Each structure stands twice: as C-alpha cells, then as structure tokens.
C-alpha cells in the first residue's frame, strides 16, 4: 500500500500544473499522484498522460467529463490506494523538505500501534505581489510531534481554522464518513475539511511549511470579484456546512466548539460578499441565509447571530453595511486573504 495518495484536480491547467506535479514527484514510490483531468479543453489531458507514462508506478491520469473541483476530489478519493489522502490544487505546490518530513512521520505512525485520522501542517500564502508571505501556523493551538485528541487542543480564535491546504486525512475515514462533494460547485474545500470532522478522533501536527498556496490570479475562485459572481455556490456550501452540524449531538464539546467557530467564519464571509455586491437581490439572499440557519437549528442560530461576527455583518441600514465592510477590510488586511 502507498503511504499517501495525492489528488491533483486539473481544469485547463496547462500553464502551471507541471510545477505542481514536479514538486510532488520526489515522494517516489511511497506516494501515488492522481492527476484528475476534469474535462479540460487545453493540453491538460496530454500533460497528465505524459507524466503517467513516464512515472507508471507513481502517477495515474484519470480523465472525466467536467464536474467541477468537488467532482475531481471525489474521483481522487475513489481512485486512491494510499493509507492517507491529500489534495494539492494544480496551481499550488509543496516544499520538498517539509514533504519528506511528512512522509517520514506517516511511515513511522503507520508502523506503530496507533491509528491517526488527520495530520495537520502549515501552509504559506504565495500571494502574487505581496512582499511578506503569510504563514498559517497552529503552534499556539495544537501539540506538536505527537498524536493528540480534541481534548488536547487549545481554543482557536477568530480567523484561525484548519483549511484543505493544512490537512491530510486517513483515506478510509473519508470513505467511511460518506464524504461526497457536490458537482459544479466552487468552495467545496471547506466541506472537504468540515464534514469528516465528527469522525476524527486522533490528530498529529507538524510545524513545517508544507503547502504553498498560490493566490492572486484574477480568475481565481477566491478573488473577491469572482466570489461575488459565484455567491450562490458559496451559499450552497455554507448551507451544507450548516446541515453538517445542525441538530446533531456531538459528544465532544471541543470538537463542536471548533466546528461552530469554523461555521461562524464561513457564514460571515458569505454575508460580507453579499453585502459587498451592493444589490437588493443579494441583500435578500443574506437574510434568507440567516433564516435558513435559524430554521435548521435555532440554538445554533442564536450562537452565531449574536456573536461578534454575526452582529457585525447584520448591522442595520446602509451605514451598518458600510461599517461591516470596513471591519472586513481590516480583517482582510491582517490575515492576508483574498
């Protein structure tokens, strides 16, 4: 069995996918790289086949009709034979030294008496034009270099949460929890991390800057203008996250609190994007999103609506919306996203 399966979802990725794949190849026979060509119209498919032919024991090329990022991740999971599973987007890449340390850690744990559900590492915002690179670390919140549980985690404040770039899941856990990401939907990376969390019992944190997250292309899904254009997809993901926790009894209080904080951030981002659009139609969609939350779980609604972020994004009137956006700008600059 391979130690690690790495899915690389590709859609018209000819301009940058080689950098991504080349950064993954040093894993050698310990890994399998599953390049998922999601119905590309450029030379992506040919590049994928080229790598699969050149590295037959390491690279798989899978071709499918276009189904979006979520469908490509689903295909990666279905084709994975590795003990653990990682997603690396085709415009991102990984750091070699950190990569080797992660593989060594997985190998050591796999040979030991304990089962590890989720491995966490740092990621770096490779933001185009930025002089200072923001590193997302978890040293203040997670024990290092050992297996731990939810009880060992310290409280993560607003703006600190674990993203797809940070995680490596046990492959069997993803299958057993029934993870199935929606097709033709952006922003499913949040669902990929969020939905399996109730199945996670054990974690391990390596303080290494493994994943390099490129951000800055105008057509990128996290670009603010693009998020506003695709706001219905953001709302869809937000509602699916609500469904993942609403009215569910999660025995572990710290896990539930973490999931609440995560949902709080995502709902605030959805609300701000709807405000930023400036249209009456989207103002109504914001109201409808909060109504959906209230209908799904009244207690959950009260926790989020009357928390700091919920109050901030629901200030009344035009002046209230302007204040909400101003606060968002400060947070945006501090955390370096979008």
Image: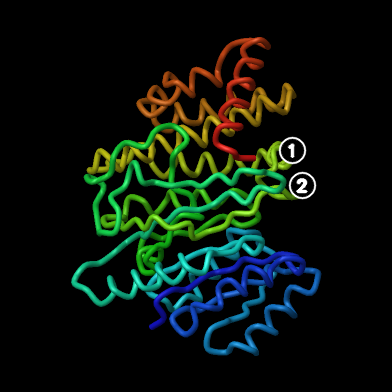
x and y percentages locating residue 245 in the rendered image? 38, 41
Image quarter for residue 30? bottom left
Q: Is residue 140 visible?
A: yes
Residue 274, label in figure: none
- The percent position of residue 239, horizontal first and vertical second, equals 52, 39
Q: Tell me the element at label 2.
A: loop
Q: Nearer the viewer, residue 76 or 87?
A: 87
Q: Quadrant of residue 112?
A: bottom left
Give the vertical position of 192 relative to 248 (above or below): below
Residue 205 lies left or right of residue 31; in this view the side is left
> Which residue is label 1 attached to?
225
Establish if 28 lies above or below 275.
Answer: below
**Residue at figure coordinates x 63%, y 85% from the top left:** 52
Answer few, some or many: residues within 10 Å of disc 2's Cα (few below 14, many 20 plus, some between 14 and 19). Answer: few
Q: Quadrant of residue 275?
A: top right
Spatial separation of the CA atoms under disc 2 and disc 1: 8 Å
Are dots 2 and 1 in contact, CB under 8 Å? yes
Where does label 2 land, which residue?
218
Q: Of all residues shown, which one is farthest toward the left?
A: 113
- The earlier-in-sequence mark between 2 and 1 is 2
Give me the residue at 77% from left, 47% from top: 218
Q: How is the image coloured?
A: rainbow
Label 1: element kind = helix
């Amino acid at each position: 069995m391979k130690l690690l399966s790495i899915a690389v979802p590709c859609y018209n990725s000819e301009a940058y996918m080689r950098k991504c794949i080349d950064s993954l190849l040093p894993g050698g026979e310990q890994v399998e790289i599953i390049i998922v060509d999601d119905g590309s119209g450029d030379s992506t498919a040919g590049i994928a086949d080229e790598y699969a032919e050149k590295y037959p024991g390491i690279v798989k090329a899978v071709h499918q009709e276009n189904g979006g990022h979520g469908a490509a991740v689903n295909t990666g999971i279905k084709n994975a034979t590795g003990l653990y599973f990682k997603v690396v987007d085709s415009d991102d890449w990984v750091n070699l030294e950190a990569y080797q340390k992660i593989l060594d850690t997985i190998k050591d744990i796999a040979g030991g008496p304990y089962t590890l559900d989720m491995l966490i590492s740092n990621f770096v915002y490779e933001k185009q034009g930025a002089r200072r690179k923001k590193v997302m670390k978890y040293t203040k919140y997670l024990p290092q270099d050992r297996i731990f549980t939810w009880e060992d985690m310290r409280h993560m404040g607003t703006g600190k949460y674990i993203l797809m770039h940070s995680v490596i899941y046990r492959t069997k856990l993803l299958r057993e929890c029934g993870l199935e990401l929606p097709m033709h939907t952006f922003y499913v990376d949040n669902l990929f991390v969020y939905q399996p969390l109730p199945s996670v019992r054990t974690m391990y944190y390596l303080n290494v800057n493994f994943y390099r997250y490129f951000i800055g292309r105008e057509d990128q899904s996290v670009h603010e203008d693009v998020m506003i254009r695709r706001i219905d997809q953001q709302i869809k993901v937000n509602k699916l996250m609500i469904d993942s926790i609403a009215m569910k009894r999660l025995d572990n209080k710290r896990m539930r609190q973490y999931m609440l904080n995560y949902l709080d951030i995502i709902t605030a981002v959805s609300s701000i994007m709807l405000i930023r659009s400036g249209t009456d139609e989207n103002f109504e969609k914001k109201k409808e999103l909060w109504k959906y939350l209230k209908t799904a779980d009244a207690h959950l609604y009260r926790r989020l609506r009357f928390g700091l972020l919920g109050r901030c994004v629901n200030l009344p009137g035009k002046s209230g919306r302007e204040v909400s956006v101003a606060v968002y700008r400060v947070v945006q600059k501090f955390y370096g996203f979008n």
